Image: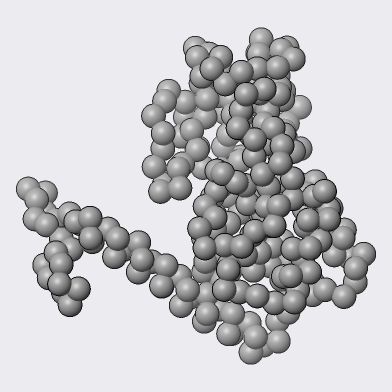
Amino acid sequence: MRVRLGTQLLERTPRGADLTEAGRVLVTEARGVLDAAEAAVRRTRMAAVGRRALVLATKAGASLEVVERLLAAVAERGDLSDVEVLLCEVGEQSWLLRRGRADVAIIHRPVDDLAGFETRDFLTEGQVAINPAGHPLAARTELGMEGIRYVPDLPLARWPRLDGTYPEGPGPEVRTQSAIAHLVALGRALLVIPASSRAWQWPRHAAVPVVDAPEITTVLAWPAHRRSADIEVLAALAADVGG
């Protein structure tokens, strides 16, 4: 198949047809254009009805203390638009920003997708392992990543990569906080998350520091092309409350 690009986008296979490398690039780039168009339409409609509230996307169960401090700072300042909190699942913040469903988002570097966004750091922290409270690991004062990967009866839960695929491993594939919370409580999995995110843990969970886990930086992110006075103020507040 040839188009005005002058290159082959599809190739026939015994199963039908697959994208060539050029085809995959076109799909990726076109998706970004479509996302931007959808965002432009959505924001234009909101402007037409006079909506001024900033929509802040954040993962349900994550960064609770950070969000609380930021909202408290917004309320104390008193001259910002209202901030609406949009709760989402793992990895959805970037999708919400690109489609204009959110104006800003709480995202974690390096695990989340930050391509095309400006960011302001809140804090950088270590990670903890969330284990079943009755498991022997829960009695430890600290853990290491190598030991966590080889616990026969408690596999490490697998979150999707940025492309939606899962890494190899024996642990269950998960996409939602509620699913992993249940699996940990049932003694079927453990997970490693930023230390501040353990605020959502249940009484049947136990958090143990993982001394050699990569540090995670929580950031406020927004589309690089989208600037407003409110976003600039919010970004400054993020730096203040994170420090």
Q: Which quadrant: the N terminus?
A: bottom left
Q: Position of residue 222 (x, y in %)?
A: 62, 65
Specify the color scheme. Answer: one colour
At 62% across and 24% down in the image, what residue appears?
A: 212
Q: Nearer the viewer, residue 207 or 123?
A: 123
Q: Which residue is more in the foreground, 170 or 212?
A: 212
Front position in the image: 224 or 138: 224
Q: How many marks?
A: 0
**Left or right: 192 in relation to 174:** right
Q: Is residue 42 above or below residue 116?
A: below
* Residue 149 percent location from the top left of the image: 51, 19
The residue lying furthest to the top in this view is 136
Measuring from the top left, give residue 125's x and y in whole percent: 71, 37
Quarter-of-image position of residue 20: bottom left
Name the outermost residue toward the bottom.
48
101 over 167 or under it: above or below: below
> In the image, is 205 to the left or to the right of 156?
right
Above or below for 180 versus 241: above
Q: Nearer the viewer, residue 65 or 201?
A: 65
Q: Determine whether, in the image, residue 86 is placed left or right of residue 26.
A: right
Q: Name the residue located 78 percent from the left edge and 56 percent from the top edge.
A: 239
Quarter of the image for residue 83 reads bottom right
Q: Is residue 118 above or below residue 178?
A: below
Image quadrant where residue 154 sits: top right
Q: Residue at x 61, y 62 (%)?
A: 118
Q: Would residue 109 be visible to someone looking at this image?
A: yes
Q: Residue at x 50, y 38 (%)?
A: 159
- Report whether residue 186 is seen: no
